[in-house]
């Protein structure tokens, strides 16, 4: 996908295709969505997609359109997928951690707090998953991992509450760090 002169690509990044993904990252901006199949290409004038119908037999359906409305709708769909997809670097780290954990013990779930580039909107998701569980703004692009913690099953019944709790922890920690810094500054001025 080209927009602004660079290529954007969404795929499922797994330990089986990790080497391939790392190779194509040299040429494209890559993101991960679990279970995504097929390939789509979009530019300002054309939309193409190859939908895998029988993966084991490499059978696919090719769809191509230069109709402006189709191109615009598909660009909108892709942009929304892009917003929810996990950056490849983060997914690769998760796979490396999973592979390392599986050697030592059975891996466990992690809950992640994400923020946008301005650090004023937040979302939570489970590590390795692309679905957002709760957000402060559905339209924001969550691109920065703020923190990770152990997943607790009792938190899954109210993801909005869990998100608010995570945000409050971050705000409290920032306030504590700020006040500690001010105390140190006063002490150093003496």
Image: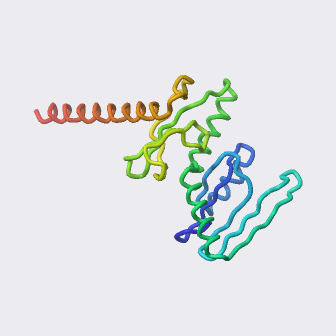
Judge from the rendering whether residue 53 lies leftward or rightward of residue 144; answer left or right.
right
Q: Nearer the viewer, residue 103 or 54?
A: 54
Residue that extends furthest to the right in the rendered view of this protein: 57
Q: Percent from the top left, x then y, of residue 85?
A: 58, 50
Q: Percent from the top left, x then y, of residue 159?
A: 50, 33
Q: Residue at x 43, y 43 (%)?
A: 136
Quadrant of the rendering where the C terminus is positioned: top left
Judge from the rendering whether residue 19 lies leftward or rightward of residue 156; answer left or right.
right
Judge from the rendering whether residue 2 lies leftward or rightward of residue 38; answer left or right.
left
Quadrant of the rendering where the N terminus is positioned: bottom right
In this rendering, is residue 150 above or below 45? above
Judge from the rendering whether residue 173 lies leftward or rightward of residue 182; answer left or right.
right
Q: Residue at x 56, y 31 (%)?
A: 110
Which picture quadrant has residue 14?
top right
Q: Percent from the top left, x then y, of residue 184?
A: 20, 32
Q: Residue at x 61, y 56 (%)?
A: 30
Q: Residue at x 64, y 56 (%)?
A: 10
């Amino acid at each position: 996908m080209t927009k602004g002169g660079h290529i954007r690509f969404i795929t499922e990044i797994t330990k089986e295709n990790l080497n391939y993904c790392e190779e194509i990252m040299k040429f494209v901006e890559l993101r991960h969505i679990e279970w995504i199949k097929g390939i789509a290409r979009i530019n300002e004038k054309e939309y193409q997609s190859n939908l895998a119908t029988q993966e084991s037999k490499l059978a696919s359906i090719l769809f191509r359109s230069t109709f402006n409305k189709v191109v615009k709708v598909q660009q909108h769909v892709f942009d929304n997928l892009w917003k929810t997809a996990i950056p490849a670097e983060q997914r690769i780290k998760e796979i490396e951690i999973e592979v390392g954990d599986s050697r030592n013990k059975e891996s466990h779930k992690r809950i992640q707090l994400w923020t946008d580039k301005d650090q004023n909107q937040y979302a939570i998701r489970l590590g390795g998953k692309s679905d957002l569980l709760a957000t402060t703004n559905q339209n924001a692009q969550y691109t920065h991992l703020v923190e990770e913690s152990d997943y607790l099953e009792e938190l899954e019944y109210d993801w909005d509450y869990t998100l608010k709790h995570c945000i409050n922890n971050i705000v409290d920690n920032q306030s504590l760090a700020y006040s500690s810094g001010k105390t140190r500054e006063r002490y150093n001025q003496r």
